[in-house]
Image: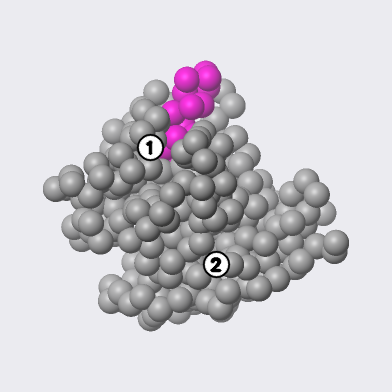
């Protein structure tokens, strides 16, 4: 069967200085990167990433988000979510110490159903920008910074020129990137470290993510996790719902679907974005509160796991 190509937003991250550390430090860095990416996706109102739309790189992750996202909402919120997530993760650094990231983002045709990984120019372009001397130099040349980010020219012209709150287009510098066979224009953003998002919900989301990571790490089951989060007075029960937020750039939240289901995609064919299907064990829920939806399944048989949610069911969690 021929690969199915769709126009997707690609985001890749890489942890600075990862390889020079020890194995326990690697584990800490990966855990904290996972939490940062959960936070960034939640801030962008992207609550689910299919397992085939995500590739781990050890010291980073490559995402090919669902087709037809509202990029005017998702792109700036992902960037700010990365920036603020790094601030939150570095408030209490673990064994790895301070996390610093390079990240890049492009839009292009991608097939997530390749035999060994993503197919298309976009996954190549986004990783070439990530590894470019300009982005590496942007981070190494700014010792105080925790993030060096680069957007492809098309995304910058279409989206980032709009001067979103806390993300002025003037903060990006134009770079002519050439790395291996890739040649193109990128727009680099190296912000000062520190908080960039505000509001009580931001802290609640972070506590929610950290709570879920701790519970899952301890081997808690889905219902125990749900009940624990639901009853915790620090956490907002509303965060436990599978809700996709869309609309204009604002703090107003609505519950419309973020795009039409992609009937040709194995990841999204039976996928109502407002209430994702879970009958294919695709439990890649960025907002762990989505596990609350398991309360309505009516039994683990529907998940193809009659003995309960085993380890395999959790392997895909972001």
- For the residues labelled 2 and 1, the Cα–Cα distance comes to 24 Å
The residue closer to the viewer here, 78 or 111, is 111
**Of the pair 142 and 239, the residue shown nearer to us:** 239
For label 2, the residue is 271
- The residue positioned 66% from the left and 56% from the top of the image is 126
Looking at the image, can residue 185 be seen?
no
Residue 185 located left or right of residue 99: right
Q: Quick one: label 1, few (<14), some, or many (20+) residues within 10 Å?
A: some
Whether 28 is drawn above or below 235: the answer is above
Residue at 23% across / 57% down in the picture? 237
Q: Which residues are magenta?
A: 21-33
Q: Tell me the element at label 1.
A: loop
The residue under the point 58% across, 74% down is 261
Q: Position of residue 152 (x, y in %)?
A: 62, 65
Does 46 lie within the magenta span?
no
Q: Which residue is mark 1?
A: 221
- The quarter of the picture where the N terminus appears is bottom right
| Location of residue 187 by image quarter | bottom right
Could you tell me residue 9's position as x and y percent? 60, 65
Q: Earlier in the sequence, mark 2 or mark 1?
A: 1
Q: Position of residue 194 (x, y in %)?
A: 30, 49
Q: Secondary structure at mark 2?
A: loop
């Amino acid at each position: 069967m021929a690969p199915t190509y769709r126009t997707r937003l690609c985001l890749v991250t890489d942890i600075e200085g990862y390889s020079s550390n020890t194995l326990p430090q690697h584990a800490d860095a990966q855990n904290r990167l996972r939490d940062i990416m959960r936070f960034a996706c939640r801030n962008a109102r992207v609550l689910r990433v299919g397992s085939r739309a995500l590739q781990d790189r050890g010291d980073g992750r490559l995402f090919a988000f669902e087709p037809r996202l509202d990029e005017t909402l998702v792109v700036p919120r992902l960037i700010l979510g990365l920036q603020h997530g790094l601030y939150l993760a570095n408030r209490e650094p673990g064994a790895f110490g301070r996390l610093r990231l390079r990240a890049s983002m492009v839009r292009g045709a991608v097939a997530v159903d390749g035999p060994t990984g993503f197919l298309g120019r976009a996954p190549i372009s986004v990783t070439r920008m990530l590894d470019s001397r300009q982005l590496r130099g942007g981070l190494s040349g700014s010792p105080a910074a925790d993030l060096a980010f680069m957007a492809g020219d098309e995304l910058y012209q279409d989206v980032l020129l709009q001067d979103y709150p806390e993300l002025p287009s003037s903060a990006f510098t134009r770079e002519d990137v050439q790395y291996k066979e890739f040649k193109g224009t990128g727009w680099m953003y190296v912000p000062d470290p520190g908080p960039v998002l505000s509001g009580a919900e931001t802290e609640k989301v972070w506590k929610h993510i950290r709570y879920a990571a701790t519970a899952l790490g301890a081997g808690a089951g889905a219902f125990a996790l749900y009940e624990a989060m639901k009853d915790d007075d620090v956490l907002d029960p509303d965060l436990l719902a599978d809700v996709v937020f869309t609309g204009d750039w604002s703090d107003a939240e609505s519950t419309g679907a973020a795009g039409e289901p992609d009937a040709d995609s194995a990841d999204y064919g039976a996928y109502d974005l407002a209430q994702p299907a879970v009958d294919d064990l695709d439990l890649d829920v960025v907002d762990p509160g989505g596990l609350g939806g398991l309360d309505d399944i009516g039994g683990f048989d529907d998940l193809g796991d009659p003995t309960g949610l085993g380890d395999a069911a959790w392997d895909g969690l972001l």
